[in-house]
Amino acid sequence: MTTSSTRSEPATETASDVAVAVDGLRKEFGQLTAVDGVSFTIRDGEFFTLVGPSGCGKTTLLRMLAGLEDETDGSISIDGADMTAVPAEKRPTSMVFQDLALFPFKNVFENLTFGLKMQGESKSVRRERAEEMLDVLDLQGYADNEIEELSGGEQQRIALGRSLLTEPDLLLLDEPLSSLDVKLRKEMQLELRRIHDDLESTFFYVTHDQEVALTASDRIGVMNDGKLVQVGTPREVYEEPATPFVAEFIGDTNLFEGEIDEADGTTVETDSGLEIVAADRDDIPDSGRGFVSVRPERITVSESSVDADNSFEGTVADRIYQGDDITYEVTVGDVRLQAEQPAADGDDLLARGDTVGVGFDRESAYVITE
């Protein structure tokens, strides 16, 4: 997987910037704790994505924001207003569901303006607002089309526009791209980001898809076992994972556990037998147990030795051709490293069984101590 987006990082947060504040949120279902003391804020106009594996509690948290589940403990405020006792229909939120929930017997205009009709807006106002939204969605002239005439991506945009037309303070998105094929999902990731930027709305997106999170988000929250384990920009979460779980869940990585030695720079004596020279940081202890994460795209594989801070000789155990990229699995002693690099011409591909040099610089080795 490629690294995260290079969008500029959000400005420092102030109280007036906060659109949503979640404090100590907890949800219990009998003996099961689905959400365990989660706290975070979402800035006004931010695209915030909550990502985690199935069953981690992210959908339960989304439903509590929407008012569809009552919290066991903790609080939620939106634009400074306490939402604890506010029912779902009274909250300044709107949701895009995983199954889109479009009406097959209504045309695009009727689907798009359904929320406005429920709010009592006249047909002329609805028509004007629909045309404006269709411009934003890049679906000009589609108002009278039947829903079944639209592609999956077009239907997705209509569902998004329907929720946005009610002008919610917070738009909740429950894995709306999960049913799309890979190519269309990639296209819609960029469309979501474009629409968000055009409207400057506040998005809270829930997904298990790390690529969506890295591509579209201003910030990412990573959940595991009901807890929020890290919040940061896509680059921070990818480059500086707070835990071994985050390192392995967000993208691919080579992760090693071992003993830390800070006597002469940062070195990790891994349990698998490799000595890895890692990037120095002030927060790394002088000794003790830790992990070191090395992303596959930071590792070079060559027919000759590699000039790097960490350089080893190994054997190609496997290779996976992916078009633009090729992933090599290289054994170094009892260790198997995964390295991803641009694919060479066919005749230049390294073969299984080849003896190779493999290496990476210390700045590519990130030590995790939690």
Image: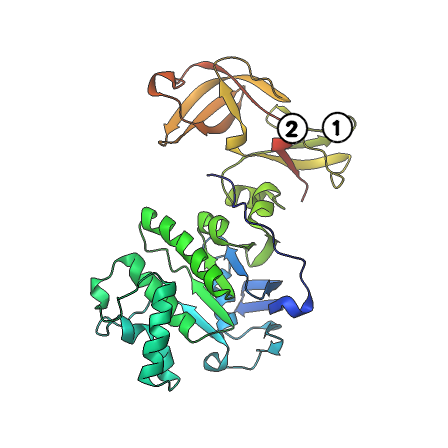
Q: Residues within 10 Å of mark 1 (few under 14, many from 20)?
A: few
Above or below — where is 319 with respect to 134? above
Residue 60 position, x and y percent, is: 49, 66
- Whether residue 342 sits left or right of residue 291 in the image: it is left
Residue 241 position, x and y percent, is: 60, 44
Residue 199 position, x and y percent, is: 47, 65
Query: Which kind of residue does numbered mark 2 sit on?
Result: Arg
Q: Residues within 10 Å of mark 2 (few under 14, many from 20)?
A: some
Give the CA distance from mark 1 to mark 2.
10 Å
Helix, strand or loop at label 2? It is helix
Helix, strand or loop at label 1? It is loop
- Whether residue 36 sits left or right of residue 129 in the image: it is right
Residue topped by disc 2:
362
Above or below — where is 182 with respect to 67? above
Above or below — where is 82 with respect to 350? below
Please report the residue visible at 43 percent of the width from the left and 61 percent of the height from the top: 195
Residue topped by disc 1:
265
Asked if residue 97 can be seen in this view, the reply is no
Residue 287 position, x and y percent, is: 76, 34
Query: Which kind of residue does numbered mark 1 sit on?
Result: Gly
**Quarter of the figure with residue 16:** bottom right
